[in-house]
Amino acid sequence: METRELTCIGCPMGCLLTVEIDKGEVTSVAGNTCPNGERYAKKEVTNPTRIVTSTVVIKNGDKPRLSVKTKSDIPKDKIFQVMKEIDAVRIDAPKHIGDIIIENVADTGVPVIATRNVESI
Amino acid sequence: MTYDVIIIGAGVSGAASARELSKYKLNVCVLEKAEDVCSGTSKANSAIIHAGFDAPEGSLMAKLNVEGNQMMDRLAEDLDIPFKRNGSLVVCIHKEELGVLKDLYDRGVANGVEGLKILSREEALALEPNLSDNVEGALYAPTGGIVCPFILNIAMAENANTNGVDFRFNTEVEHLSRDDDGIWHIRTNNGEYTAKYVVNAAGVHADIFHNMVSSNKIHITPRRGDYCLLDKEMGGHVSHTIFPQPTKYGKGVLVSPTVHGNLIVGPTAIDIEDKEATATTQEGIDSLIEKASMNVKDLPVGRKVITSFAGLRAHEEHHEFIIKELPDAPHFIDCAGIESPGLTSCPAIGKMVADIICDLEKPEKKTDWNGKRKGIIDPNALTLEERNELIKKNPAYGNIVCRCESISEGEILDAIHRPLGARSLDGVKRRTRAGMGRCQAGFCSPRVMEIINRELGIPMEKITKSGGRSNIVLERSKAVKGDE
Amino acid sequence: MLAYDIVIIGGGPAGLAAAASAKKADTDSILILERDHELGGILNQCIHNGFGLHTFKEELTGPEYAYRFEKEVYDLGIEYKLNTMVMDISPDRVVTAMNRTDGMIQIKAGAVILAMGCRERPRGALNTPGYRPAGIFSAGTAQRLVNIEGYLPGREVVILGSGDIGLIMARRMTLEGAKVKVVAEVMPYSGGLKRNIVQCLDDYGIPLKLSHTVIDIEGKERVTAVTIAEVGPDRKPVPGTEERYTCDTLLLSVGLIPENELSRSAGVEMSPITNGPVVNESLETSIPGVFACGNVLHVHDLVDYVSEEAKRAGENAAKYVQSKGEEISGDVIKLVATDGARYTVPSTINVNRMDDLLTVRFRVGAVYQDAYVSVYFNDERVMHNKKRVLAPGEMENVILQKAKIASFPDLKTITVKIEKE
């Protein structure tokens, strides 16, 4: 049996949630004022995920950096692994919104895609 | 090469001396430890051209103040320096102290200040409606003025440079000695310089050099003054420079418009030991508005302040300028203790320093000396048609870099490429005002950095705010130093 | 002199949305003037996600959100000029602008839409004591340096202010390899979204110190340390609570100010609360035919609301041009914000000019729990909506119905207030 405390991000209330976990299963959520709190707590405790946004080095473009994001959310504990791969990228312009920059980042099955248009010069 | 004259310090005293000496056939060099002119006391002060009623009758300070004040119109015209005689008022708020105004008046008359007048409460309020309701009377000095201290300093240095004076920046004097032939050896972090004459215009550091060469010691106390600069929205709150009655620590907290349309409030007066300690304090800043509000009403506290800063006055314990050749150190000329009214006095100080050297050296005058300098164009002062012409000739004037002060790329390019051009963000700021507005360089600093990078080939990571280790960005992101 | 039906000052999210809606409302001659070298405004440097949930029902990054509107502007064939600074707007709507290629341009505008956005409050406004070394950045300047230019402004960072930009930059600097030591917030609550506190600070173990401020900055050349202290209810530092952090960088995220130099010089009446123009139900300022929308009008929390407001400004400007500035008569009803509500946008309503539904936006001055947003027509309470929480960081709104306003006898004042019960 394990107890964790979380701040709900559903609304400005920021309810302080107390979550009880037994063998990886959420057994109870307390402190929430609405059902969103319970849903958030369950997800955040069992499988927390995040979208990572950053930039990559782009050569011969009209800008020195291309902004990118993971196309969908990735496990929270892989953020820094994802960043490591993003930092190592060296690509050439042009690149456009939605272009795939990394196919499968940090073995998550999720691609990293461009979020801006950088034209070549 | 042995210089005829080496001047230590490129503040207003050093720059004024250099310009005066540039009229003669002399090899002159200015050594400055900072990366630019106007980096010490000259850059952080009230920016006031004082009328001259404060200094004791018969003092050198009084004499040079009144002379400097009178020289300012011509200097401003010749060198294109923003200067305005807005007049000053010393405000009395206690009936029983009205006599002090009379004393000041008498002293001013004795010092040779013209146009002084004691005003009744009604007259004072008619002239300056935002004076405190408690005003009992005021001393009006129409010759009081305001100046851009940066441009005053920069313009004199530029003009000296154009007339042949060398400037060495990032060059800090470490040791001074005089050899048997009477030549001064000046050891610096950038090698040794030699000269027949040394001018000690080192501001708060002047005592260090004086004491290296003379047995008659002096002590300069850095007297810190905190200031607040208010938004241009407040620039019209008063039109004259408003002083309280003076105390033994100086002229007190003044409220004044600046030549660029802001409102300045300050300074405090706190004696310290550290000659570089220009940190403001909460107590200092808090006390400013409180003190200023005794003489001027409705001063907005808080959010109309766009910046606060502190300057150090070079206070010598006898509160007098020391400008002379030292009896026990021949050809070493002190220019020390230059605190307020130093800015006002600087043209006269420069003249006096040059006169001392000329009396000894008897140099020939140059025939091709050019005492004029054109400042950076202010496109905001042009008509639409003139501005259009300017942009057609040089499209850089059509690109605004600093939004708050409406400064174009053309002005910044001029600041970088003119004599003794800017090398840093502060250098650009002091020459053009880019970054001096209400957003305080938040918007324009990356853009000014790009221009410096492009024009001077200084890598972005090496561009500084004001020299030394004041780098703005530390490195390329993504650790790609090698491959970009 | 050039002439356009509508001139829009600013090509950020507000200007783009206003242009598109004006075009769709059958105004052909529209010109956007943008001072940067590309459209999109500040969104281009906001590379984090979370934009567009209301508008597009998906989470976009700033550049993606901006591009949707840019594309619309391109597809609709709306004219725009980049690298163009507007220098002046005259009360009779002559816009003077400048760029490298055209020089000085004067444009006679049938209507003007102000969409200049806002800027960050600088250090000076805080009067923070200490030295003034390099290494002090507003969060947005640091964001530009990192995201657009690709430079690291610092390695060890203290952040003052917990507005969303500050929180976003805490995460951004961390992901780029910097160490963010603490975020100090002078208020007892954060002005940022809960989500950003969790995902930008908690995720990376960055402490948030509420009721704390910076009381000293050390470093003669570059920042070397920052001291923060707790503040009492009077927001003055409490002696003995000082904590010193060695660092090379101080980021400031201490508020945004609408950028209204042009509006002021044109003579537009300004609100001392929002620092933006006073507008009527049509988002028209005190100068007829001059409209305002987006952050230049009042600082928004979500860009979705900027787009929505800008759409209305564009439609109303089109209407104004098509009616050739003809006055629509009608009684002017005053909107008043009081008891916790700080302001309302708009400030007046002419019922004959309003749409069937009108969204009135406002902000509160403190955090309220289980309070009511109430609307009074004269002295009669007509709306009483319970809210679990109201916070200064979030924009609130009430929706007024034209039919109800029109049928209320002798309506002079509509008051928005916060009530405990």
Image: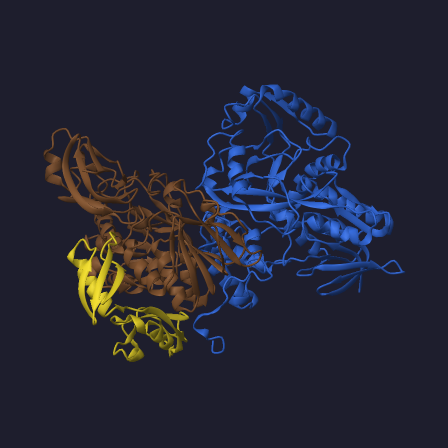
Q: Quadrant of residue C60?
A: bottom left
Looking at the picture, does residue C4 appear above or below residue C274?
A: below
Residue sitting nearer the eye, B77 or B169: B169
Q: Quadrant of residue C232?
A: top left
Looking at the picture, does residue B150 appear above or below residue C414?
A: below
Q: Colour of chain A?
A: yellow
> What residue is at 66 percent from the left and 26 percent from the top?
B115
Which lettered chain is shown in brown? C
Looking at the picture, does residue B120 appear above or below residue C57?
A: above
Location of residue C414 in the rendering, given as x and y in whole percent from the top left corner: 20, 35
Farthest residue toward the right?
A: B180
Location of residue A41 in the rendering, given as x and y in whole percent from the top left corner: 21, 62
Location of residue C284 in the rendering, given as x and y in whole percent from the top left corner: 26, 42
Farthest residue toward the front?
A: A1
Q: Colour of chain B?
A: blue
Q: Is residue B109 visible?
A: yes
